[in-house]
Amino acid sequence: MRSMLVIGLGHFGTHLALKLSELGNEVMVVDRDEEAVNKIAPQVTTALVGDCMSPEILKSLGVGNFDICFVCISDNFQSSLEITSLLKDLGARYVISKTDRDIHAKFLRRIGADEVIFPERDMAQRTAFRCSARNAFQYIELTPEYAIFEMSLPDNWSGKSVKQLNVRSRHNINIIAVKRNEHVVPITSPDYVFAHNEHIFVAGSKQDLIKLMDKN
């Protein structure tokens, strides 16, 4: 269990705080909107109404005690910039700031953000890649070039083993797990035999993965 501070309860901040809490983390949320704070309060560890542009308020939160501080303010870049800077000045261990513009990300990193995230852009890219590949169900980007896809098992793979298919040499990808009846099982043996209606998780370059799925 880790301790998290989420500043800003817009759509992203709210969903982030709820998921962090669901995963068993200690979560404190802070926002100027009392209604938003009261709505989420029963589902997080601590919910406070306050303006984090105030150094006094941020200092009172003990930001250095949190494993990660999230700055989820996207409608006011100046506020996001100042809060990120204040958090680092007050000893925050790790600050993740949200933005939607590359130029803003550059300034956020310059004043101390340890990580900058682009939720809308990242979701758009994941959706684009998933929809560009036939029979793809999930998409996880590892780097700009490499990814993991969940895909349906090609019909001609059913009843064959990993060793027989030799996908690493033939398709330049790796099969890392199989999904059956909603359970994901890692593939650790080349003798594993695939069954009809299974899904597989494959890793490789995006280009090679899309080529494979287009053949399916």
Image (cartoon, rainbow, N blue to C red):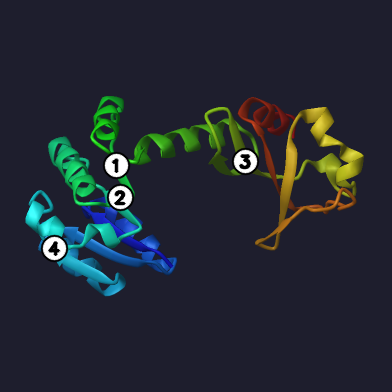
Label 4: which residue?
Answer: 60
Residue 71, how many percent across, how many down? 25, 48
Q: Earlier in the sequence, mark 4 or mark 2?
A: 2
Q: Residue at x 89, y 47 (%)?
A: 161
Q: Residue at x 67, y 32 (%)?
A: 209
Task: Tell me the element at label 2.
Answer: helix
Q: Would you identify the image quadrant in which residue 113 lies?
A: top left
Inter-mark Cα distance, 4 to 3:
42 Å
Inter-mark Cα distance, 4 to 2:
24 Å
Label 1: which residue?
Answer: 98
Q: Would you identify the image quadrant in which residue 96 lies?
A: top left
- Residue 12 is tagged as 2
Inter-mark Cα distance, 1 to 2:
9 Å
What's the amino acid at mark 4?
Ser
What's the amino acid at mark 3?
Ile
Task: Tell me the element at label 3.
Answer: strand
Q: Nearer the viewer, mark 4 or mark 2?
A: 4
Horizontal side, residue 137 vs residue 107: left or right = right
Q: Are marks 1 and 2 in contact (CB under 8 Å)?
A: yes
The foreground one among 58 and 105 is 58
Q: Earlier in the sequence, mark 1 or mark 2?
A: 2
Label 3: which residue?
Answer: 148
